[in-house]
Image (cartoon, helix red, strand yellow):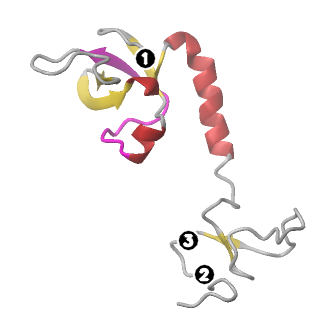
Amino acid sequence: MKVQANREYIYYPNMLDRIDGRTKLVPGSIVRVVNLPGCPRANTMGHAHVEYNGQFAGLVHTNSLHSLSDRQLVIDAIKRDLRQDSPIRVESRCVQCGYYSCEHGEGEVQPNHAFVDPKRTAPPRPGYQA
């Protein structure tokens, strides 16, 4: 998306800004694109400098900036992201069997199996050699 300097946009980070984000912006922030003296102008290599509440916020990818008219789409995307933060996540492990997914081919999660965050200790998967 091409952005214009001195216009406001909604920040919703794309994959690049999620993995290597160098700002403290949160999804849904209203930011203003600025052209700083001595720096590449907006849209150079797909990036733009932004300010938040009158303070310089950093350099973001232009695909992370959405027009204010798209605010309902951004709100829906943020809600979808929040819903996906359920107890059973890709990085969660089952306490009972140690697998990342308890489906075991049947397509249903096994009853009474609890999932934990990988940062906590979890039993190794069966057959796993440390």
Q: Which residues make up the magenta segment? A: 20-34
Percent position of residue 9, x then y: 43, 17
Residue type for callout 1: Tyr
Judged from the image, the secondary structure of the residue bearing numbered disc 2 is: loop
- Graded by Cα atoms within 10 Å as few (under 14), some (14 to 19) or many (20 or more), the crowding at tag 2 reads some
Percent position of residue 2, x then y: 40, 13
Q: Residue at x 45, y 25 (%)?
A: 63
Using residue 83 as the reference point, say whether residue 40 is left or right of it.
left
Using residue 17 as the reference point, say whether residue 95 is left or right of it.
right
- The answer to whether any part of residue 29 appears in the image is no
129 lies above or below 48:
below
24 lies above or below 87:
above
Q: Distance of mark 3 from mark 2, alpha carbons? A: 7 Å
The reply to whether discs 3 and 2 touch (Cβ–Cβ < 8 Å) is yes
Q: Residue 110's image quarter?
A: bottom right
Q: Which residue is mark 2?
A: 122
Residue type for callout 2: Ala
Q: Residue 43's image quarter?
A: top left
Q: Residue at x 44, y 43 (%)?
A: 18
Q: Which residue is mark 1?
A: 9
Q: Quadrant of the N terminus?
A: top left
Give the mark nearer the N terminus: 2 vs 1: 1
Give the mark nearer the N terminus: 1 vs 3: 1
Q: Identify the disc placed on residue 118.
A: 3
Q: Distance of mark 2 from mark 1, alpha carbons? A: 43 Å
Judged from the image, the secondary structure of the residue bearing numbered disc 1 is: strand
- Graded by Cα atoms within 10 Å as few (under 14), some (14 to 19) or many (20 or more), the crowding at tag 3 reads few
Residue type for callout 3: Pro
Q: Residue at x 36, y 45 (%)?
A: 20
